[in-house]
Image (cartoon, rainbow, N blue to C red):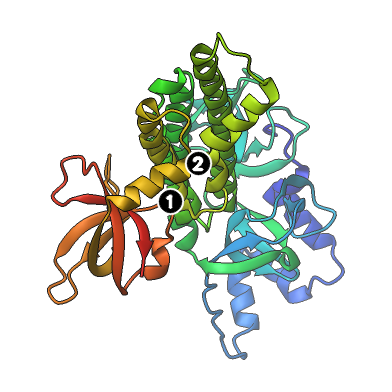
Amino acid sequence: MLHDGLQSGDYPMLRLAKRFSSPSLSLSLLFSLLLGTPINSFANEESSSNKTTQTAPYHSFTGQISKNKVRMRLQPSLESPILRELNKGDLLLVSNEMEDFYAVQAPNDLKGYIFRTYVLDNVVEGNKVNVRLEPNVDAPIIAQLNSGDKVEGSVSPLNSKWLEINVPNNVYFYVAKDYVSNVGDSQYIHKLETRKNKASSLLADAKEQAYFELSKNYESMNLDNALYSLNQIVQGYQDLPEKVQEAKEVIQHIQDDYLKKKIAYLENVNHVGTKEQKVNPSKNVQEVNDRGNQFIKSSSSMSGAMSLWVPAENNYYQNWLKNNPNKTEDEFYNLQKENAIVIKGVVEPYQRVVKNRPGDYMLMQQDTNAPIAYLYSTKVNLEKFVGKKVSLQVAERPNHAFAFPAYFVLSAE
């Protein structure tokens, strides 16, 4: 019986008949076949005078696609059906090579489809049962399963007569060598998948938290944790450019929404305070932009670690404004400098991922390497001072019950 469109060439006797019809079949091979001698035994006898050579095992590696719209094919031929188009940066596990093509394992998101009639209790019933690229009999065959093979699948939402399953591990597809670069060993792709999943989870949590905070009124918003997570992705996942780009887009969205809410809030505050006075609307909006949005505007030129603290510093500034109306950011920080203290030590990164961390850096005693304080800044790029002994002008900030005091760095020497 042909299962789901099997070709006649899939049957051993038909293949044997083709062999007999070939003019290259030797007379001795024909006698061996008629006498029942196994073909592989004859082949061994025929080559017994030759020295046996063993092919070295192929060293699998992680391949990265170098261009967009690179075709992954069913067979190593330009005439073979195209299974999908790959994009620049996509990773594949390369398991072998054939002339101008690499043999690669199926991507995790590529699914196969098997007719449900041939599966009972997750076990295949029947030999040479086709696994197709789509749930219909006209789709390319990507694998074949035999009686007893186990499959895990679910009913296809596209066609309930088919099961959607993972592509068998021993099935390979083909990509032209010219568009694949070796970027690591065979384990690298698994490590990167783990990192990608972690980055995706971090990104999803940050987006959910950010959009929840942005749904609040301006005075209630706290975007610190969301921005911290997003900047973690930007700085810590450079090997996943698509995740970095997505994180940057979310940060930009947060900044845009935050800016709108701040303008609306400050306009309202200004309106309430001067409703008996005539106000120049264009001048008022300009003052709002200059005074209330300097934090957001300046953050675009900061490092990721610095821009993380923009919302927190903005909150301090806004609270100060309540008692010091119409004062500028410069005046706020000038007052901070007047009351600043000076501390000295060696700057080191603080890399623990904890909630409400009081800084991105630690100041350490040079001789004993004991911690002195937590540090952060939107004014000074502390990354430039890592490992160096410095003198810092600092203003105190909440340490959130951590073991050492926390400071905002105003200047560094």
x and y percentages locating residue 23 in the rendered image:
87, 69
Q: Position of residue 280 (x, y in %)?
A: 67, 21
Per the image, label 1 sits on a secondary structure element best described as: loop
Q: Quadrant of residue 385?
A: bottom left
The kind of residue tagged 1 is: Thr
The reply to whether the C-beta atoms of the residues labelled 2 and 1 are less than 8 Å apart is yes
Q: Is residue 351 visible?
A: no
**In the figure, 61 relative to 273: above or below?**
below
Q: Which residue type does callout 2 highlight?
A: Phe
Q: Is residue 213 left or right of residue 135?
A: left
Residue at 61% over, 91% down: 49
Residue at image coords 52%, 31%: 125
Residue visible at 52% across and 50% down in the picture: 169
Q: Dividing the image into 4 quarters, which one contains the C terminus?
A: bottom left
Q: Residue furthest front?
A: 277
Residue assigned mark 2:
295
Query: Can you say which quadrant of the picture contains the N terminus?
Result: top right
Q: Quadrant of residue 308?
A: top left
The percent coordinates of residue 64 (x first, y second) are 62, 61
Nearest the eye: 167 or 315 = 315
> Between residues 369 and 296, which one lies in front from this camera angle?
296
Point 64% across, 75% down: residue:
43
**Which residue is disc 1 drawn over?**
378
Along the line of sight, the residue nearer the viewer: 359 or 168 = 359
Image: 5 above or below 68: above
**Left or right: where does residue 352 sit relative to residue 271?**
left
Residue extending farthest right: 23
Q: Camera-side residue: 223 or 116?
A: 223
Tell me the CA gap for discs 2 and 1.
9 Å
Callout 2: SS: helix
What label sits on residue 396 in the rendered view? none
